[in-house]
Image (tube, grey):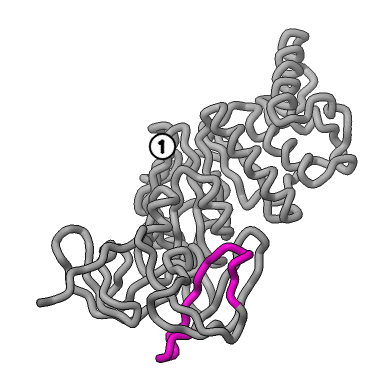
Amino acid sequence: MLRVRDVTRVFPADSAPVHALRGVDLDVPAGSFTAILGESGCGKTTLLRILAGFDRPDGGRVEIDGSLVAGDGRFVRPERRRVGIVAQEGALFPHLTVAANIAYGLPGGLRSRFGPAQRENRARRVTEMLRLVGMAGYGDRRPDELSGGQQQRVALARALAPAPAVLLLDEPFSALDASLRVELREEVRDLLRRIDATAVLVTHDQSEALSLADQVAMMRDGRVIQAAAPADLYACPVDPPAAAFLGESVEIPCTATADGEGTVTVDSVLGRLRVARSTVFDDRLILRPEHLELGDHGAEAIVTSVSFFGHDGLARLALPDGTPLLVRTAGSALPAPGSTVHVHVTDALTVKAPTPV
């Protein structure tokens, strides 16, 4: 298990100190996959460097498998933390073969004074890692003879070879083409689950975090503002900016009345609705495009534009008062721009509230 408590990091600057981390708390259970998600400059890379031991925190504690590695005057160097790292572009040694790159991650690096038994064990481990990442038979190749996806598989094998307590992934798919990125990240997710690895992924890609991780920790301004399972984070964001960062969303002015059952009754341009309390912030109702439907009833709206994605699409609407809406629908059912449609909130999200007597 990885445990972070009240970790801070301040970088000096000419104008004013930069507070990169402001009391970060995070738990990563053993055998789980956590994604640290946030915009550039939120502190996620600084946190990863502190977990790896590349940087020292100014305050707080970091524990790996119950052992203190940073804090209270103690600092354990990176090579003694049992942490594996996969960098953004693999960072393979170009002059070494694939097998030698993987062997470099094992204790002792490439030292030649190992006896026959030790060399045999290392060779066996390299073969095992190549097979694990689907690269059997590639041991004699050089990195420049591999595709980008193959290089990342080798980098993963090198990081996993010493059986680390925690695997850190620093945006390892960002340099790949879109189709390969999706394919490889799913392979990595399945592999890590198969070997029950504890992993932390740093990413700014919302779909990557939501599709891969068991837990997503969302960072903003040097803090973890929310950590939850992907479905919970998407359905119950901590605030409207978090909702907008996690995917398309719309804000509708409303008046809300709590009904004491974990739901809220709201009055809005879309009618009187009973919705989950987590969808209402002050006088705003937060909806996802899939929470809205086009049909033969509901509020009248004008279609301002549409986006076709094949299997589905997005219709951008404007209500008579100018309120913009986004509706996700089947690609074959997109309305024509300029047309008038009726839109309502799906029954799956709401329960009709009783009309006052």
Residue 257 sits in quarter: bottom left
Residue at 67% from the left image edge and 49% from the top image edge: 182
Residue at 58% from the left image edge and 27% from the top image edge: 163
Magenta region includes residue 326: yes
The answer to whether residue 218 is left or right of residue 281 is right
SS for dot 1: loop
The answer to whether residue 350 is left or right of residue 73 is left
Farthest residue, direction bottom? 321
Farthest residue, direction left? 357
Identify residue for label 1: 29
Q: State which quarter of the image contains the C terminus.
A: bottom left
Farthest residue, direction front? 296
Q: Is residue 49 visible?
A: no
Magenta region includes residue 347: no
Of the residues shown, which amino acid type is indicated by label 1?
Answer: Pro
Q: Position of residue 243 (x, y in %)?
A: 43, 66
- Magenta segment boundaries in residue numbering: 318-335
Residue at 47% from the left image edge and 32% from the top image edge: 31
Residue 259 sits in quarter: bottom left
Which residue occupies the foreground of this view, 77 or 237? 237
Q: Is residue 121 above or below residue 43?
A: above
Which residue occupies the foreground of this view, 169 or 62? 169
Residue 167 sits in quarter: top right
